[in-house]
């Protein structure tokens, strides 16, 4: 028997740990998926099976693309705080830095810290020359974060499932805060 292993690197930086999703993260992830917080990613997804499939997809993206979103966890407690990282789903216009923070992480600068880490990883490790973030037009908090990260609104993309999203272009690797 041959096994396929998808290595998901673990990093510790600042207040956060960036690691592979684990089964003990599931309740927090399901709570996020079932809540209105998940509207920006096509939710809510109230059924446990939907959340499980989406969490498995986080791991599968690493296997198929060689990069993906990490479960972002508190460095001291390892409690899951959100999902952040580079991604490129099949129906997306180009690679992006995506962030979703759980309710317990809201308003603490977690999304900003993690998005900066993810962008730096995309530029320095993956060698991306540019990156976007796709944000629902009514998601004022994510748009504010994109602005804080130095991204500028470039236009819209009509996603076949999620609907219209705004494309926010991040500064180039030479211009970006890392």
Image: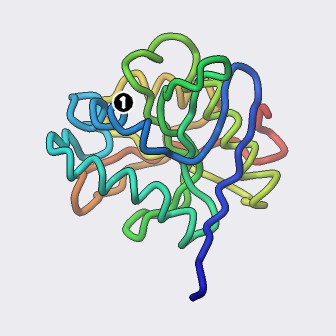
Q: Position of residue 166 (x, y in %)?
A: 39, 44
Q: Which residue extends farthest top? A: 107
Q: Which is nearer the eye, 112 or 83? A: 83
Q: Position of residue 7 (x, y in %)?
A: 67, 62
Colour mapping: rainbow
Query: Mark 1 Cα within 10 Å, few/some/many (few <14, many 20+)?
Result: some
Q: Which is nearer the eye, 168 or 145? A: 145
- The number of numbered badges drawn on the structure is 1
Q: Which residue extends farthest bottom? A: 1
The N terminus - image quarter: bottom right
Above or below: residue 19 compared with residue 79: below
| Callout 1 secondary element | helix
Q: Which is nearer the eye, 47 or 156? A: 47
Q: Residue at x 63, y 67 (%)?
A: 66
Q: Position of residue 46 (x, y in %)?
A: 15, 40
Residue occupied by mark 1: 28
Residue 119 lies in what quarter of the image? top right
The C terminus - image quarter: top right
């Amino acid at each position: 028997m041959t096994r396929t292993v998808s290595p998901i690197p673990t990093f510790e930086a600042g207040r956060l740990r960036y690691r592979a999703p684990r089964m003990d993260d599931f309740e927090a992830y399901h709570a996020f998926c079932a809540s209105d917080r998940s509207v920006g990613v096509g939710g809510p997804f109230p059924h446990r099976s939907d959340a499980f499939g989406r969490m498995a997809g986080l791991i599968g993206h690493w296997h198929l693309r060689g990069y993906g979103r990490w479960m972002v966890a508190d460095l001291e407690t390892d409690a899951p705080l959100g999902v952040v990282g580079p991604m490129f789903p099949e129906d997306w216009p180009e690679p992006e830095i995506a962030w979703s923070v759980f309710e317990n992480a809201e308003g603490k600068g977690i999304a900003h810290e993690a998005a900066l880490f993810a962008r730096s990883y995309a530029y320095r490790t993956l060698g991306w020359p540019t990156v976007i973030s796709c944000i629902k037009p009514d998601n004022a908090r994510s748009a504010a974060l994109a602005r804080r990260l130095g991204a500028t609104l470039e236009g819209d993309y009509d996603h076949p499932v999620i609907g219209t999203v705004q494309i926010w272009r991040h500064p180039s690797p030479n211009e970006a805060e890392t």
